């Protein structure tokens, strides 16, 4: 909503945008922390979530240079293993065997056969 000559501001939205910018910025100022450091130390996020996938171009300043040693994975690094496709996963589950039906005996002849 506009109030007179000034436009209304969503302070929460602006604060969130500033926070995201600080968290995901790739720049010399951000240093190693701004260059996928979580992934280098701990491994992939849950379900292989990629926080840098749709990174805004304004958050990558292209001024950061990192040596190969800074881009090495840490000792606690765990790689993400994608689950198998559904068809392949179903083949890994053993088929349940149904019990063989037992015929019901009726009459006197059947009772004699059971003894």
Image (cartoon, rainbow, N blue to C red):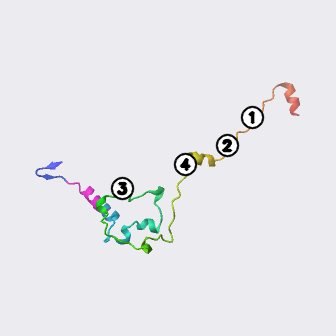
Q: Is residue 82 magenta?
A: no
Indicate which disc, 2 or 1, sits on the residue closer to the N terminus: 2
Q: CA distance from mark 1 to mark 4?
A: 35 Å
Q: Main secondary structure of the magenta part?
A: helix
Indicate which disc, 1 or 4, sits on the residue closer to the N terminus: 4
Mark 2 touching mark 3, by CB under 8 A? no
Q: CA distance from mark 2 to mark 4?
A: 21 Å
Q: Residue at x 75, y 34 (%)?
A: 101
- Most distant residue in the left direction: 5
Q: What SS does tag 1 mark?
A: loop
Pointer 1 local density, CA inside 10 Å: few below 14, some 14–19, many at least 20 = few
Picture coordinates of residue 83, whole percent (x, y): 54, 53
Q: Hey, which quadrant is residue 18 in on the image? A: bottom left
Q: Which of the two discs, 2 and 3, sits closer to the camera?
A: 3
Q: Hey, which quadrant is residue 99 in on the image? A: top right
**45, 110: nearer the viewer:** 45
**78, 109: nearer the viewer:** 78
Q: Residue at x 46, y 71 (%)?
A: 72
> Mark 2 highlights which residue?
96
Q: Residue at x 23, y 57 (%)?
A: 11
Picture coordinates of residue 7, whole percent (x, y): 16, 52
> Mark 3 highlights which residue?
54
> Mark 4 highlights which residue?
85
Q: What SS does tag 2 mark?
A: loop
Mark 1 touching mark 4, by CB under 8 A? no
Indicate which disc, 1 or 3, sits on the residue closer to the N terminus: 3
Q: Residue at x 83, y 25 (%)?
A: 107
Picture coordinates of residue 84, whole percent (x, y): 56, 51
């Amino acid at each position: 909503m506009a109030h007179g000559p000034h436009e209304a501001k969503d302070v929460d939205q602006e604060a969130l945008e500033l926070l995201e910018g600080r968290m995901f910025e790739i720049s010399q100022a951000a240093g190693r922390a701004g260059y996928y450091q979580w992934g280098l130390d701990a491994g992939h996020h849950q379900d292989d979530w990629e926080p840098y996938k749709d990174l805004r171009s304004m958050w990558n300043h292209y001024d950061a240079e990192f040596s190969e040693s800074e881009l090495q994975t840490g000792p606690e690094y765990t790689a993400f293993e994608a689950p198998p496709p559904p068809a392949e996963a179903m083949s890994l589950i053993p088929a349940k065997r149904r019990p063989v039906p037992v015929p019901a005996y009726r009459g006197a002849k059947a009772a004699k056969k059971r003894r």
